Amino acid sequence: MTPTLPIHDCLPTLKSALASHHEAVLEAPPGAGKTSIVPLALLTEAWMKHQKIIMLEPRRVAAKLAAQRLADNLNEPVGKTVGYRIRMETKTSANTRIEVVTEGILTRMLQHDPALEGVGLIIFDEFHERSIDADLGLALCLYGRELFRDSLPLKLLVMSATLDGEAISQLLNNAPIIRSQGRQYPIQTHYSDTRPTTFFDIESALANTIEQALEAHSGSVLVFLPGQHEIRRLSNKINAFLPHHPETLLTPMYGNLTLAQQQQAIAPAPTGKRKIVLATSIAETSLTIDGVNIVIDSGQSRLPKYDPRTGLTRLTTQRVSQAASQQRAGRAGRLEAGICYRLWPEYQQSQLAPQAPPEIEQADLTSLALQLYQWGVTPGELSWLTPPPQAAFLQATELLVSLGAVDRSTNSLTPHGELIASLAVHPRFAHMMVIANTLGLESKASLIAALLPERDIDQSHQADICTRLDKLSGYTVSGQNEKALVRTIQQQAKRHLSQLSNSLQETNSRHNSRHNAPTSINSNVQQKTDTNNGLLIALAYPDRIAKQRPNQPTHYLLANGREAILSTNDSLRNHQWLAVANSGGKQGQSNDNIYLAAPLDPAEFDHRLGQQVITHNVVQWTEDGKLLAERQRCMGKLIIDSSPINTLCEEEKARAAIDWISKQGLGVLPWTPQIRQWQARVILAAEQSRNNQKAWPDLSNQHLEKTINQWLQPHLGAITHKKQLANIDLFSILQGQLLWPQPKLLDEYCPQRISVPSGSSHAIDYLQSPPVLAVKLQEMFGCQQTPRINQGNTPLTLHLLSPAKRPLQVTQDLASFWKNSYQDVKKEMKGRYPKHPWPDDPLTAVATAKTKRHLS
């Protein structure tokens, strides 16, 4: 008999809500019983009308365990009333009324049957995890229900432990929110005294805390770490002191373990034993690990994040959210009072982000985009809790176009796109499998499609995918865990191949076309060396075709423009061309590490990769200032080969020169001080003319850069090297911008030189603003006002110089200088320069550039 759980108190309210509404939101903390009780309680409701219930779980192991608990509550085996469907495994029957599925399964079901006929209720369990499949599934359910379910509406129930219930309620037509208080025993929380730093040794800190907890408390321990590498390192440290605790078992728990291994971690410890479970965030929700009353939280999680700049999804380590830390701590109080150790100070708890960002904001949206194209809808036509980011969706669309899945002119799926959309794999892999079928390589492609999403089955630290395919072909398999994973991948490859066969048959029937029938999984993979590995990877990842850099055997440039590096002793460094299946690095790095790749025969660019090759003429200057004119065949940003273009018209040469000058800046042109002074004079005249509505040209650097095609390009037809730029008559070109009578007016308004009272003529420096006249003080005797230019509108700045031509005064008010400052200057300078005149009254003295001896 099922024990009474907190969720039972909410069932009448929940049933009433779903009887009067088509949507409801259920908030219930871990341990309340929502997953194991709610589907059974709703199955017999009158509004169900004997239809099915579909319940979504975020992970395979959670789906299997949920189905098992539901079946146990009915005293039935799984597969009767309650069944499940997950990737690589299905257990249902004609009598199944409740199907527990992983979230990706629902979107496939919706593609085949948008109305979901025969389904009365869909339950989105653990919706707070906000996976992209759950968000998409909910959006498609709402859309499909509106179109196809008028007479018997599809009901939706969103369940979560931590969720913004108001936001989801608003999305679901203001659905009623039912809240369960749950059953949470008291948890005593211990915080660290020190703050984790960049070089924080997380494994040592956790090992010390675990040993302390084992000494101080009884019960099993659940430890949260960011990833499996940390789990392995921590396991080594724990094994050093575990002999002192013979009653303690050590088990890992992370996504890449087999389902059997995950179930072993979840199972209760044998009588008289306790467990240390080292887990990733997979153990935060959905899974109950019996006997745990101690939680040790590293405060870190590792989440996939798509980088639109590189087209790669990277695993990034980050701080957990407040919601996640509460979920983790709650695992200690499911069955009794518990203890939680947190490896961060208490004051940092409030600094954590309230919630982790939804996956749709930082995921690769290619599969989502393909499914929306298959539905014939745009993101804007669906109702989202969080809409897909526009830039990421556009990038996903561009990839689908490059794979031939989307016709840009009609903005719809091509026949090839419809075929790859029918396959339950990433569009890259689906494209690879469909093309491989035309080449007789579909079995190898199915193996690669099954291999790449799984953890690496080879620990040789060599990147060649051939070593993995050898294991899958039975050449070099060792160890039980490795054999189990190999069997799993082989089974999945067979499913891929079977699905490809079914899709091709359906396509042949629908379009009266003929595609090759796929061969068996073993018929064309038993080749220990196969040059087709690189071809197949290149079909899936054309943007990751790589070419070796000259004289750098481990450095490769990818077709997407990124640099990637092999390990120093990797055998693939002997190949100029690679197709990279898996690469990665830290966020912000300029290059990536190559983890999995295969040699690529460049002859494929003339054959089976020919459609991806683009041939175009390149007429441009190199960075060091030389004209490059060649016909290039390219794969993305990689040059496959090139040949010179021997005949170019002057216009093409001039355009190339202009592009280089524009990038380098106008400073590469043969400017002289004379030209710069003339330019400044024109600019000054133009500034004044704007007030008088006179059309002087704008010769500022900004405008010259903007209009360089107009004034400079006609003069560059014979220029092919930066050294030849010195031969340009830049002064004449710029002077040609003036219209008659502007050259004459320029000399009148802004003269190069100006006469001073001494009779001398001095140059005006127009490169300073206002323009500067530097003149010996004695040459300005008798001048009462500051000289002006530009029709009297621009006073010059006077630099009054000593006999040694050092500035004595800088002024734009000469009259004020004579009146207020001259006597002080005279007093100081008269003794220093006694041979020069220093009259008491400079306004009546004779202006001169000479000494007193020359004046007598």
Image (spheres, grey):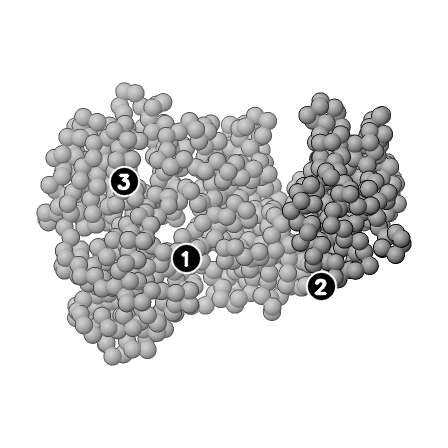
Residue nearest the observer in this picture, 198 or 595? 198
Q: Residues within 10 Å of mark 1 (few under 14, many from 20)?
A: some
Task: Give the x, y percent position of residue 430.
Answer: 52, 42
Mark in front: 3 vs 2: 3
How far apart in space, not on screen, are marks 3 and 2 (Cα)? 56 Å
Task: Give the x, y percent position of residue 617.
Answer: 77, 40
Tag 3's secondary structure?
loop
Residue nearest the observer in this picture, 76 or 219? 219
Amino acid tagged 2: Asn
* Residue 665 visible, this angle: no
Q: What residue is pinned by disc 3?
A: 164
What residue appears at the point 54 percent right and 28 percent down from the top-left corner? Answer: 411
Q: Earlier in the sequence, mark 3 or mark 2?
A: 3
Q: What residue is pinned by disc 1?
A: 317
Amino acid tagged 1: Thr
Residue nearest the observer in this picture, 386 or 448? 386
Task: Tell me, yes or no, whether the two marked residues, 3 and 2, touch with CB atoms within 8 Å.
Answer: no
Left or right of 105 on screen, residue 664:
right
Report the residue that reaches farthest toward the top.
Answer: 151
Left or right of 391 on screen, residue 853:
right
Location of residue 366 with respect to 277 vertically, above or below: above
How far apart in space, not on screen, are marks 2 and 1 (Cα)? 35 Å
Tag 1's secondary structure?
strand
Q: Earlier in the sequence, mark 3 or mark 1?
A: 3
* Residue 850 visible, this angle: yes
Q: What residue is pinned by disc 2?
A: 551
Tag 2's secondary structure?
loop
What residue appears at the point 31 percent right and 31 percent down from the top-left corner? Answer: 171
Left or right of 145 on screen, residue 522:
right
Residue 164, by quadrant, is: top left
